[in-house]
Amino acid sequence: MSRDHLSSTILAEAIWHVSSYSGGQGECVEVAHNIPTLIPVRDSKRPAGPVIAFAPHAWRAFISHLS
């Protein structure tokens, strides 16, 4: 799937929320969990900026290293 297709089709459906792992100091990460095949992540200060997309298993592994 091309990057343009990803952003225009799948990310248009994303419901963003601030990650529970963000510190609440305005330096927030937004995550969308409503897309079954990936976990998109973005900077809350730049909602039109770049998005990093994790496979669900990769996201779980990433989060487990933060705890």
Image: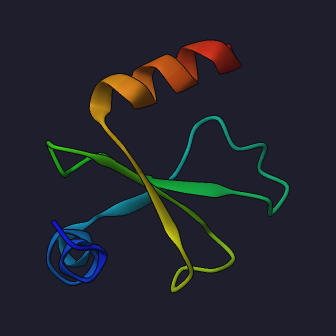
Please state if 56 lies on the left or on the right of 30 as rendered.
left
Which residue is found at the position 30% from the left and 74% from the top? 3
Please state if 55 lies on the left or on the right of 45 as rendered.
left
Which residue is found at the position 48% from the left and 18% from the top? 61
- Which residue, as the protein is rendered here, is positioned at the far front? 2
Quadrant hosting residue 55: top left
Who is closer to the viewer here, 67 or 49?
Answer: 49
Is 31 situated above or below 4?
above
Quadrant location of the C terminus? top right
Quadrant location of the N terminus? bottom left
Residue 48 at x, y = what percent? 51, 86
The colour mode here is rainbow
Quadrant hosting residue 49: bottom right
Please state if 11 lies on the left or on the right of 20 as rendered.
left
Which residue is found at the position 54% from the left and 79% from the top? 47
Residue 44 at x, y = what percent? 62, 69
Which residue is found at the position 56% from the left and 13% from the top? 64
Residue 40 at x, y = what percent? 38, 55
Residue 7 at x, y = what percent? 28, 77
How many labels sit on residues?
0
